[in-house]
Amino acid sequence: MYKFGSIEKKIYNLRNEHPLILPQIDPDKNTIKTANDWFKRIEELNLHVIVMGSSIISDTFHLQNLINIAIKDFKFDILLYVNGMNGVKGVSGKSAVYWSQIPNSLNTFFSWDGLISNSLNVSKNNFEAIPTVYVFDFRGSFGTANWLTRSNPVPREKPEISLAIAKAAEYLGMRFYIMAGGSGSNLPPPETHIQKISNLSKLFVIPTSGITTLKHAESMFSSGADAIHIGNLLEKESGFKILTEIVKLSKNYSGKDFL
């Protein structure tokens, strides 16, 4: 029988209290100095898990340095994406990967080939794999991730499609559902899709991309999101001020038991 890894269990235990905020660090946009500053601010907000990654990783040596600092100096748990784990090492019990399949990608690397090519690196490089379905829905933009995956986005007016994908993923044994739009999305994640998946599936729902205001975060939590990614917002001048308000807001919402 499969046993949950320590990071996945930690995420579920934190969700028992309220929805989670997962800050996302783009290694290509952060020097060691700026990353240290971000880590300090995130630590002050008592956030425990951070995500690292971007559509294209140009410097794995730099990514490795950021991973080491996050885990060893700041004691964070980290989550990577499949495309970012090649060539880097984690720390046992502190590093995990969204082991994700993108069902609406027309590029087979993201639907299957990437998993095969990286599968032997997971435990060897001290990562735990969290089975994840990663789905693009329409956000009115076309970024690097959209181009690479050649994704066919789920229409905003069709939440039943997202639910059907979620149920199929659930039956395959996946546990996380990431709602993606690509970096720089013009629209936030569609609330009706979050509601459907949260109410009618057992998956841990993580809306990402385009969550740039307190109002956006509130709509995600009210719709039933279990966690949200905050990335591009942190690159703005007022980003950490808004993040502080989002963290406070999350504590107004009830917990949910996944274990």
Image (cartoon, rainbow, N blue to C red):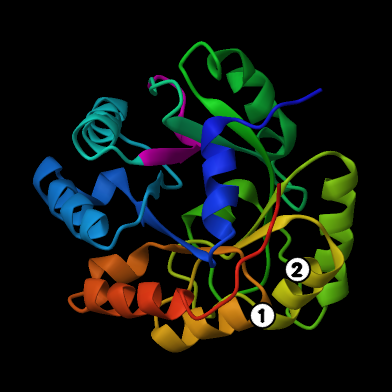
The residue drawn where x is 78% and y is 67% is: 197
- As drawn, the residue found furthest toward the left would be 33
Mark 1 highlights which residue? 223
Measured in 3D between alpha carbons, the distance from the residue under mark 2 to the one under mark 1, in whole angstroms, is: 8 Å
Viewer-proximal residue among 63 and 90: 90
The percent coordinates of residue 41 (x first, y second) are: 19, 60
- x then y, percent, for residue 217: 48, 79
- For the point 58% across and 77% down, the residue is 220
Dot 2 corresponds to which residue? 198
Callout count: 2
Q: Secondary structure at mark 1?
A: helix
Residue 208 seen in the current view: no
Which numbered disc flags the more N-terminal residue, 2 or 1? 2
Q: Is residue 163 left or right of residue 190?
A: right
Kind of residue at disc 2: Ser
Q: Nearer the viewer, residue 57 or 98?
A: 98
- Compared to residue 237, the image places residue 104 above or below, namely above
Q: Marks 2 and 1: CB-CB under 8 Å?
A: yes
Q: Position of residue 248 (x, y in %)?
A: 37, 77
**Image: 194 above or below 33:** below
As for residue 79 lying within the magenta part, the answer is yes
* Residues shaded magenta: 77-88
Query: Would you place residue 156 above or below residue 200 in this image?
Result: below
Q: Is residue 73 above or below residue 220?
A: above
